[in-house]
Amino acid sequence: MKTILITLTFFTAITLNAQAGYEKGMTKAFDLWEQNKTDEAINLFERIARAEKENWLPFYYAAQVHVFTTFEIKDAKEIESRLKKAQDFLNEAKTFSKDNAEILIVEAMLNTAYVVYNPSVYGMTHSAKVEELYQKAKALEPENPRAMLYHTEWKMGGAKFWGKDPKAFCPEIEKAILYFEKEANHDEPFYPNWGMNQVERVQQNCK
């Protein structure tokens, strides 16, 4: 019995140390991202992902940083490179978490980035993907605030492109706000809960 207790204590200590190391690493990666050290953040997220082996979140965030960064740069080669790497990371995340609305939302934003960057090349092929991915995410989690907010922004952009009034979609922003307010804290550390700070920006389309 004493041997069993010692063994259990040993493995519990290893697990706790590994969890502490994971949380410390993830916190550091988010700090780097906040400091606009995007590539350093991506590299750290990837290192954590390789060490964790079966955790989708570090891959997810590595992809997200790449996608968000493309909206701020102009160089075509860099955009293409980042979006390809982001897709690779999302594909790896999917191997550990299938039918995950959060992954689908970032993948929809990735395809949006292609359309924004080069609409003449990617508009026809990727627009349908964006719509499909948001619809899948909302089917999985009908009250996911990120799915509601960013799908609404996508539809508003389409309305503007076709000369229609984007204000028709403003009630959906109110739904997204409600969903953000209702969103509960997830048990899994670092589970996605971002997006509320972007509501005001999207609401500019309602003025």
Image (cartoon, grey):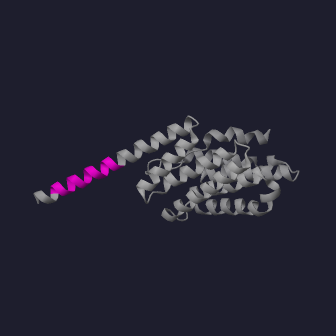
Res. 147 visible in picture: yes
Q: Residue furthest front?
A: 77
Q: Residue at x 67, y 41 (%)?
A: 199
Magenta region, residue range: 5-18
Res. 141 visible in picture: no
Report whether 64 appears left or right of 14. right
Report whether 53 appears left or right of 129. left
Quarter placement of the C terminus: top right
**Quarter of the view holding residue 101:** bottom right
Q: Residue at x 74, y 52 (%)?
A: 154
Percent of width and height locating residue 126: 74, 61
Q: Residue furthest top?
A: 35
Quarter placement of the N terminus: bottom left
Q: Residue at x 71, y 39 (%)?
A: 201
**Residue 141 or residue 122, whichever sits in front:** 122
Q: Main secondary structure of the magenta part?
A: helix
Q: Residue furthest right?
A: 163
**Residue 82 or residue 103, whichever sits in front:** 82
Percent of width and height locating residue 40: 53, 42
